Image: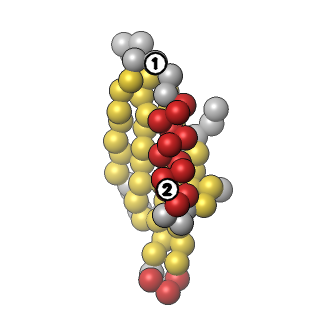
Amino acid sequence: MDAVLMHRIDAAKNMRRFYRLDVAPDLFGRWCVAVEWGRIGRSGRLRLTAYESATWAALARQRRAKERRGYVAI
C-alpha cells in the first residue's frame, strides 16, 4: 500500500493544509505509522508510532478521522 496524501483547502479561512499517512517497517522488526502534517508549501511535522504487527487498521482509522474533518485524498 502506498502512502495516503490528503489536503484541506479553504480560501475563505486562508487554510491550505496537508496530511500524509504511511506504514513502514523499522530496523527492529516493528511496524511504524508515519504521520506528517502541516501547511502546504512549508515543512511539516512528523510523528512515528511503533507497533508490533502491521497496522493497516490504525492507518485506516486515522484516514477516516481526517476525512470527517474535511480532508480529501489526492
Residue 51 in view, yes or no: yes
Tell me the amino acid under the disc marked 1. Ser
Find residue 34 and report its image quarter.
top left
Going by the image, does 1 lie left or right of 12?
A: right
* Circle 1 Cα neighbour tier, 10 Å, few/some/many (<14 / 14–19 / ≥20): few
Is the residue 55 above or below the residue 21 in the image?
A: above
Name the residue at the top extreme: 29
**CA separation, marks 1 and 2?**
23 Å
Q: Position of residue 23 (x, y in %)?
A: 50, 31
Going by the image, does 2 lie left or right of 38?
A: right
Q: Look at 52% across and 33% down and name the residue there.
A: 57
Q: Position of residue 6 (x, y in %)?
A: 56, 56
Q: Are marks 1 and 2 in contact (CB under 8 Å)?
A: no
Name the residue at the bottom extreme: 12
Precedes in sequence: disc 1 or disc 2: 1
Res. 66 mark: 2
Tell me the amino acid under the disc marked 2. Lys
Find residue 3 and report its image quarter.
top right
Q: Say which quadrant the C terminus sits in.
A: bottom right
Find residue 72 and report its image quarter.
bottom right
Residue 25 in view, yes or no: no
Q: Secondary structure at mark 2?
A: helix
Q: Look at 43% across and 34% down and name the residue there.
A: 33
Is the residue 48 above or below the residue 73 in the image?
A: above
Q: Say which quadrant the N terminus sits in.
A: top right
* Circle 2 Cα neighbour tier, 10 Å, few/some/many (<14 / 14–19 / ≥20): some
Q: Look at 42% across and 12% down and name the residue there.
A: 29
Residue 65 versus residue 39: which sits nearer the camera? 65
Q: Secondary structure at mark 1?
A: loop
Residue beneath label 1, please? Answer: 53
Residue 55 versus residue 48: which sits nearer the camera? 55
Q: Look at 34% across and 51% down and name the residue there.
A: 45
